[in-house]
Amino acid sequence: MTQAVLSIDLEALVANWRALDRCSGTSTRTAAVVKANGYGLGAARVAQALSQAGAREFFVAQAEEGADLRAALGPEARIFVLGGHMSGDARLIGEAGLIPMLNSAEQIARQMAALPDAPFGVQLDSGMNRLGLEADDWAKAAPALLAKSPALIMSHLACADEPAHEMNARQLAEFTRMTQGLDVPRSLAATGGTLLGPGYHFDMTRPGIGLYGGRPFTEARHVATLSLPVIQTRIVQPGEPVGYGNTWHAERVTKIATISAGYADGIHRVLSNLPHLYAGETPCPLRGRVSMDLLTVDVTDLAEVPETLDLIGPHQGVDALADLAGTIGYEILTGLGPRYARHYRESLG
């Protein structure tokens, strides 16, 4: 094997969506967030598997992502664009039948000028101060927008991965206040909000990271496995260094395997000397710095060096790797580079 392989278990992905769908309850629709190329795993294949399982509504970040997704899913899926209607997006939104989540007065004006009869949604700022109409702007815009029957009104929770955080209740109260009595579908909960309980579910939940096996959905099934090919091995004597900067020195006669992957592939340099790679059940420590295209791994204790070692897998998921890097699983997943061959497990029965 000459190419690193990112294996995606679509059966596990679908199981995670179904579990979050059950958590959402029977009166709430469960969408799927597939932005950033399906969190790095391949938006088209991920969305097709979820569509087959029953998902009918999908969220992307940009109109370009939405147009690609439309080509993969066909005409029936509803595809929402979280970034809204940006300058120059009208043709893509119209031709692909996308639903922009309008975030500002400027986006509202752009949508109404270019696509006055096309579907749209509205995003409200309930306290995160990132995207969406603030309360005063919503009060001014609401009469005209509501007359056109928005497809969805949504907001986004800032601290849903911390269930006890007071911000969750504050945003829930504000979103409820801003939308009370409206005859329009509403959505507040992504993965974390879905897990907070029925009070946060409204008419639609829209899980993202939980589909792909990440926190805060701790019961999620493992989805991604990253297998990296061994290029060569060498014997390093006690006291000899390995890698740039001589950051690791052998304390015994050590067999080092050089692996084809590095920070150009989304394996952060800050992980130097920190994680293990796995040969089946056996952990093999990363020795020395992560370089652009290569890793060096201690395989001394293996009876036989395999063709590949796993950096991400059942024994070390994306969140465990993120903890070592001082980041979050989202960044690990979405940073997985284009040089990986993406292989999909197809059995979805």
Image (tube, rainbow, N blue to C red):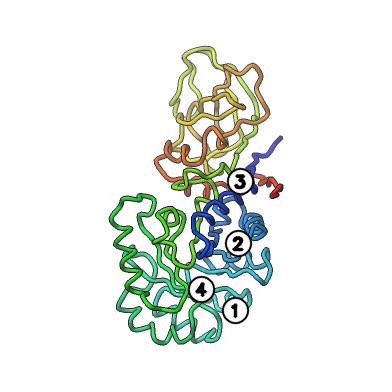
- Which element is circle 3 on? helix
Q: Are marks 3 and 2 in contact (CB under 8 Å)?
A: no
- Specify the farthest residue to the front: 26
Going by the numbered disc 4, the residue's amino acid type is Pro
Depth order, front residue of 231/30: 30
Circle 4: element type: strand
Callout 2 amino acid? Ala
Marks 3 and 4, the one that precedes in the sequence: 3
The residue to which callout 3 is attached is: 12
Find the distance from the CA under tag 2 to the CA under tag 4: 19 Å
Identified by mark 3, the residue type is: Ala
Q: Residue at x 50, y 24 (%)?
A: 242
Where in the figure is residue 270, as x and y percent of width and height? 43, 37
Along the horizontal axis of the image, is 27 left or right of 13? left
Say which quarter of the image contains residue 314.
top right
Could you tell me which residue is drawn at 48 percent across and 62 percent down?
205
